[in-house]
Amino acid sequence: MAELLRTHALESRVEALAAAGIVVEPYVAMTNVRGADAPPAGIRLGPDEWLVVGAAGEPGGSVTDVSAQWITLRLTSGHARDVLATGCAIDLHPRAFPEGTSVQTRLAQAGVILTSLGAGGYRVLVRSTFAGYLADWLLDATSEFR
């Protein structure tokens, strides 16, 4: 039986994104957990809805693996906040969006989960079907800062 290999939606754009200071993070297991307390690494998406990033643990409710539908990008350049602000309505100033804060929002019309990593860095989770579009938008948006 042929071995199936996971292909990354941004495989063809990794080098261009790296040149723009955007890291495509390696695959990490992500799980939607409902009915249980999320660990400290959990992202609260709404009432009774958490996205847990990390290794699977003992479920306290129902768990659905949603890893295949998300791509993770990490923006760390000195202009990351400026780049994101051109396509996002969230106030990203550290007083309003401190380290560890996560929100669901739109970035360039793509639905994303945005997390502040501190020191001017951000993690962007985007559905794999929108990853190519968002990568192209980010490359264009970062061009004025290179």
Image: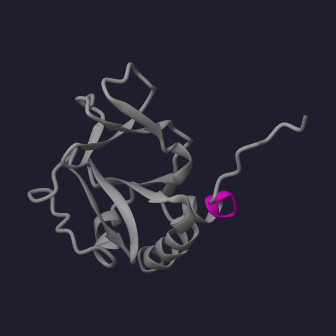
> Does the magenta-highlighted stretch encompass residue 13?
yes
Q: Is residue 102 left or right of residue 33?
A: left
The answer to whether 5 is drawn above or below residue 19 in the figure is above
Which residue is painted at 64% across and 64% down in the image? Answer: 13
Which residue is painted at 54% across and 64% down in the image? Answer: 131
Of the pair 37 and 13, the residue shown nearer to us: 37
Of the pair 138 and 101, the residue shown nearer to us: 101
> Does the magenta-highlighted stretch encompass residue 77?
no
Find the magenta span and give its range. Answer: 10-14
The answer to whether 41 is drawn above or below residue 108 in the figure is above
Q: Is residue 129 left or right of residue 51?
A: right
Of the pair 123 and 81, the residue shown nearer to us: 123
Q: Quadrant of residue 114?
A: bottom left
The x, y position of residue 94, in whole percent, is 15, 56
The x, y position of residue 45, in whole percent, is 26, 50
The x, y position of residue 71, in whole percent, is 51, 53
Which residue is painted at 48% across and 78% down in the image? Answer: 143
Quadrant location of the N terminus?
A: top right
Which residue is painted at 58% across and 68% down in the image? Answer: 132
